[in-house]
Amino acid sequence: MFPSDLAWPTSESAEIHSMSMEFFTWPWMESFFGDEADRYRFAHLSGAVKFLPYGVLVDHFQHEVYAHPKWSADERNACWRSLETQYLPQKDYSGIDVLERGGWWMRQLHIFLDPFYYIDYTLAQVAALQFLARMLDRDSGAFQDYLQICRLGGTLPFRDLMHRANLRVPFEPGCLKDTAATLRQWFAQHMPAVTER
């Protein structure tokens, strides 16, 4: 092990720090947005939730491409479009031929520059959403658990860091469902006020 290994956690763990801090700053959003703070919170949270299926789509696509290295460009496009209809069925590219044929994936630079990094964003976002859910549930230990994993740096792998932070590993059954239940309550309480403006 090198000293740098202790300073830098794995990618999926490092992303937890910034994504979670964005949520921990929610109580101060009135200082930035005044009476529009809940509109910001709504945009922030809905963007985080909507990102999850896209992040998984990017990762799934890469697994398929690497499993089929001899695919033609058309086969890669067809794979993307098929997966896109699975993960993002609301996408409608009517009249845009290249996107109807599955060309959207070419705009995602991570696929070319940082293969398999996107699942790190997705895992970290689930961790950050758990911290938000704990914060919304008035869990006084949430921020201390966050500081704990920041202090641990790269000394532990992802699953161990999650446990040290009293978070569930995203792959555990019920993790997303339980986290989403608290987030749904927040949306139910705040969405009418946000959309009326």
Image: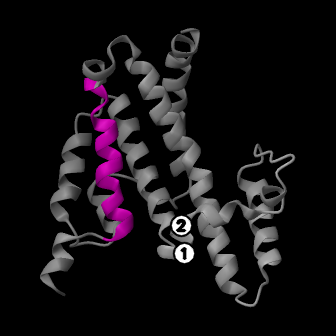
> Can see residue 85?
yes
Q: How many marks?
A: 2
Circle 1 residue: 112
Give the extent of the magenta segment.
10-28
Position in image of residue 91 (x %, y %) = 76, 46
Q: Against 189, is 74 above or below?
A: below
Query: As rendered, which of 74 and 128 lies closer to the eye?
Result: 74
| Residue 2 as seen in the image, left or right of residue 76 | left
Distance from Cα at disc 2 to Cα at disc 1 = 5 Å
Decide: few, some or many residues near mark 2? Use Cα within 10 Å; few <14, some 14-19, many ≥20.
few
Identity of the amino acid at label 2? Leu
On residue 109, the disc is 2
Colour pattern of the rendering: one colour
| Residue 181 as seen in the image, left or right of residue 7 | right
**Residue drawn at 33 percent across, 63 percent down:** 13
Of helix, strand and loop, which mostly describes the magenta segment?
A: helix
Q: Is residue 102 magenta?
A: no
Q: Against 1, is 128 above or below?
A: above
Helix, strand or loop at mark 2: helix
Circles 2 and 1: CB distance less than 8 Å?
yes
Decide: few, some or many residues near mark 1? Use Cα within 10 Å; few <14, some 14-19, many ≥20.
few
**Residue drawn at 65 percent across, 66 percent down:** 106
Query: As rendered, which of 50 and 109 lies closer to the eye?
Result: 109
Helix, strand or loop at mark 1: helix
Position in image of residue 85 (x %, y %) = 79, 54
Identity of the amino acid at label 1? Phe
* Residue closest to the far bottom: 70
On residue 131, the disc is none
Q: Is residue 26 magenta?
A: yes
Position in image of residue 158 (x %, y %) = 35, 67
| Residue 32 as seen in the image, left or right of residue 70 | left
Residue 105 occupies which quadrant of the picture?
Answer: bottom right
